[in-house]
Amino acid sequence: MMQKKSLAALVATLFAVPFAAHADVTIYGFISSSIESTKATGATNPNQPDYKSRTRIVDDNSRIGFKGFEDLGNGTKAVWQVEQSLKYFEQGGTNDIGQTATFATRNSFVGLDNSNAGKVILGYNDSVYKSMTNIGLNLFGDSTAENNGASNVYSRGEARLKNSVHYFSPNWSGFQVGASYGVDETRKNGTNASRISLAGNYTNGGLQVALGWDRTNDTGIALNSFQNSAYTTGALSGANITYTKLATSYKFATGTFVGAGYEFGRLDQSTAGAASLKQDDWTISLGQDYGAATFKIEYSSLGRLKGATAGTEDDYKAHQWALGLDYNLSKTTKLFSYYTKITNKGKQEANFANTPVYTSTAQTSSGTTYGVLSQGVDPQAFGVGLKVAF
């Protein structure tokens, strides 16, 4: 009997030690999916197809992550995170153009965090331009109706930076600043396409204000060429793509949320001697809580491309409406519904943020397949979904 008790105690100890050593590890994420009716019609070129109306099941940017820390003493912690997308789980992990998700596809890093000096991380992470200027404006985040991103209508300067270092200051009475630097490890044609982001925000009760600046060096856009609904870029020494954004929001005690953001882009072209282009975009967000329900509406606009010579400047405009209703079944589970429509002018092809539609596919010179949306088509979708966080 004594031997059995000793053996049981030994086995319990062997299993307990690794769990105790890693007690700070957190597993987190969410699974979210919708059923929606989608179409994109009105192509301006008769040789380009529409995206005919259909019903589809979509993954709303689901993800899983692992994060943790080790207390090093004197207010300093070692921090780490590995996060990956579960996008397209509804069709086995492969999207409509054959791409699959791999490990560490989202914010993944290692770093040091000091309560007095701030946090420094290294890895693959959102630029501070993206992470510090959102301030709740993206009411439809992760769904088809989201408006943010390089291929979308608003906040086209945001990005997740490879091979990057990021600094986040402590919170000084509501103020915080940050900086990001993305290293160019390829250096094509003698250029250095590094990326710099600077941002700051201020929070006081329900008020938030943010300002951001982002520049990609030695890079220009190919005016009459699109890829994934964004301007294709090319390496050119001395060319830059620069964005500046100002955003503010306020959450009232009544549950009313209002917010607005404005972004200005200065876009050098990837052809030597070509004039710089300018394009702005803006958004207005409104939400209202009613008990467990939240009604929300958002309007975003992408302005004319000043300096464009292919077509007219107005041909590059786009607008997006989004309406939605969320209902929280619990703290971690909610039902949601949405309707969204993007109106593209003749040479624009802004697309859905997380579940884009494609009318055809193409390949880069290196053989990478990407989706193409016909210019001038107007994507729209109505959907109902369920999200469970963990």
Image: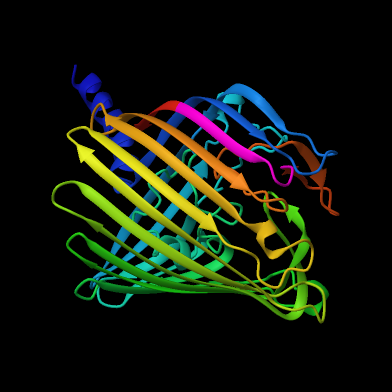
Q: Position of residue 277 (x, y in %)?
A: 68, 73
> Residue drawn at (27%, 37%), measured in percent from left and top?
294
* Viewer-closest of 90 and 251: 251
- Nearest the camera: 57 or 315? 315
Indicate how the structure is coloured in the image: rainbow
**Identity of the residue drawn at 41% across and 45% down:** 66
Task: Determine whether 67 is above or below 87 in the image.
Answer: below
Is 217 rendered above or below residue 124?
Answer: below
User: Which residue is most to the left?
Assistant: 253
Q: Is residue 169 visible?
A: no
- Residue 348 drawn in magenta: no
- Residue 235 point in image, percent of width and height: 77, 71
On the picture, is 137 further left or further right than 60? left
Tally of numbered discs? 0
Give yes or no for residue 382 being in the magenta stretch: yes
Residue lying at the far top in this picture: please name it.
1
Picture residue at 43% right of the left edge, 33% below the top: 338
Specify the segment rendered in magenta: 373-383
Q: Position of residue 244 (x, y in %)?
A: 50, 73
Res. 1 image quadrant: top left
In this rendering, does residue 56 appear at all? Answer: yes
Check the picture and name the quadrant holding the C terminus: top left
Measuring from the top left, give residue 232's x and y in whole percent.
73, 60
Left or right of 162 in this view: 239: right
